[in-house]
């Protein structure tokens, strides 16, 4: 009976074999991710952009090394975190690495996402691709995932390059807390550039011409990076109360200006990175003399620094998720037709 039952099973695929075959099948999502990642890596646009960012970061490394050799310290309490000054110190000739990420990082996000959808639509490949057994949400999620993976690879490579050069320059390895602070800084940088990537993808879905979406993204980047601070300075001067006003009025005005400044993603990123890379930062808002009296000027531990910049980090995450949600909803509701 046992032999008969075995013979009856010949020719039928075993249940375990079917499961293994299904597991070996690559999902369309990861196929599109691999294709988009490779296309970005081989494009001239990405090569030119990564060349500019790499040269800028090498310049910032040189400025930091020169500043460290000259004995420049940003704060006396940060002498225990000398390795972190590779990311924040400068001799004045060039901006720091954190400043370069804040200024040039959005450009990388815009360059990777401004034609993510409308170029496919213009070439007529979008309808051809979605006529295959591929879910529409897989397509937009794969576009975003591939670009975000590339941004993470670039930022972490540059960050680890600076850490390696710091080992040669300073001569001693970083502490575990310094490594964690640098890794968190790089993760925050990926979130920040991811916001601009989502914004540019939203513009590429909204506008049918790639040039229009690119110019719109660059205009928003210039506005928040350059002009928003100027406008806030004008508003501050126009609405500032007299110096003889009561302390409560002065504090209310300072908090209002701080809230307006925090509407800019660049300002949120600057506050977050300065808190993570400078342990001596103990507050991100106005302080009165009564609050400072009795406080010991010592660096904050990592957990307290993370708690201090947690609202700014949540704000960046929320802005990124809102842009992706709008892109997702707009793309799913759009009608896609063939050009024929």
Image: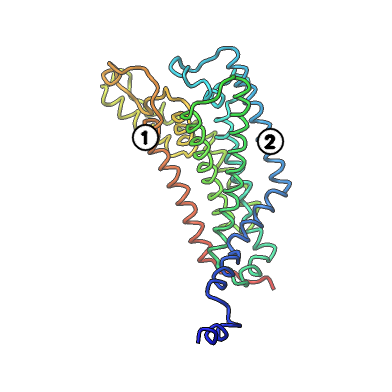
Q: Is residue 272 above or below residue 215?
A: above
Q: Nearer the viewer, residue 331 or 136?
A: 136
Residue at the farthest top position: 70
Q: Is residue 36 above or below residue 261?
A: below
Q: Position of residue 280 (x, y in %)?
A: 42, 22
Q: Quadrant of residue 315?
A: top left
Q: Position of residue 190 (x, y in %)?
A: 53, 42
Sequence-first disc among 1 and 2: 2
* SS at circle 2: helix
Q: Position of residue 77 (x, y in %)?
A: 43, 17
Q: Quadrant of residue 141?
A: bottom right
Residue at point 29%, 21% (across, down): 288
* SS at circle 1: helix
Residue at point 57%, 41% (across, down): 106
Residue at point 55%, 76% (across, down): 14
Mark 1 and mark 2: span between their CA atoms? 34 Å
Look at the numbered discs 1 and 2 and tell me whether their residues touch, using CB distance below 8 Å: no
Q: Quadrant of residue 307?
A: top left
Q: Is residue 308 left or right of residue 289?
A: right
Would you name the residue on which mark 2 appears? 52
Q: Is residue 87 left or right of residue 244?
A: right
Would you name the residue on which mark 1 appears? 307
For the C terminus, which image quadrant? bottom right
């Amino acid at each position: 009976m046992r032999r008969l039952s075995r013979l009856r099973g010949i020719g039928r695929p075993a249940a375990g074999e079917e499961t293994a075959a299904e597991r070996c099948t690559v999902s369309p999502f990861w196929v599109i991710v691999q294709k988009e990642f490779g296309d970005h890596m081989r494009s001239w646009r990405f090569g030119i952009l990564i060349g500019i960012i790499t040269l800028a970061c090498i310049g910032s490394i040189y400025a930091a090394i020169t500043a460290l050799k000259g004995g420049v310290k940003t704060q006396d309490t940060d002498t225990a975190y000398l390795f972190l000054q590779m990311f924040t110190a400068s001799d004045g000739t060039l901006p720091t690495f954190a400043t370069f990420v804040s200024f040039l990082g959005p450009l990388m996000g815009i360059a990777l996402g401004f034609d993510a959808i409308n170029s496919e639509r213009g070439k007529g490949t979008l309808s051809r691709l979605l006529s295959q057994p591929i879910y529409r949400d897989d397509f937009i999620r794969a576009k975003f995932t591939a670009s975000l993976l590339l941004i993470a690879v670039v930022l972490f490579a540059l960050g680890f390059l600076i850490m390696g050069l710091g080992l040669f320059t300073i001569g001693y390895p970083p502490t575990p807390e310094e490594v964690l602070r640098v890794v968190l800084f790089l993760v925050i940088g990926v979130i920040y550039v991811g916001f601009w990537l989502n914004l540019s993808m939203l513009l590429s879905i909204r506008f049918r011409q790639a040039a229009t979406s690119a110019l719109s993204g660059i205009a928003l980047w210039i506005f928040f990076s350059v002009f928003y601070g100027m406008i806030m300075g004008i508003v501050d001067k126009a609405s500032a109360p007299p110096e003889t006003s009561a302390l409560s009025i002065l504090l209310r005005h300072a908090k209002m200006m701080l809230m307006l400044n925090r509407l800019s993603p660049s300002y949120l990123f600057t506050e977050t990175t300065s808190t993570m890379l400078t342990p001596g930062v103990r507050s991100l808002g106005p302080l009165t003399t009564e609050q400072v009296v009795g406080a010991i000027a010592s660096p904050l531990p990592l957990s307290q620094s993370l708690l201090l910049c947690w609202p700014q980090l949540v704000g960046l995450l929320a802005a990124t998720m809102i842009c992706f949600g709008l892109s997702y909803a707009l793309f799913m509701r759009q009608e896609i037709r063939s050009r024929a």
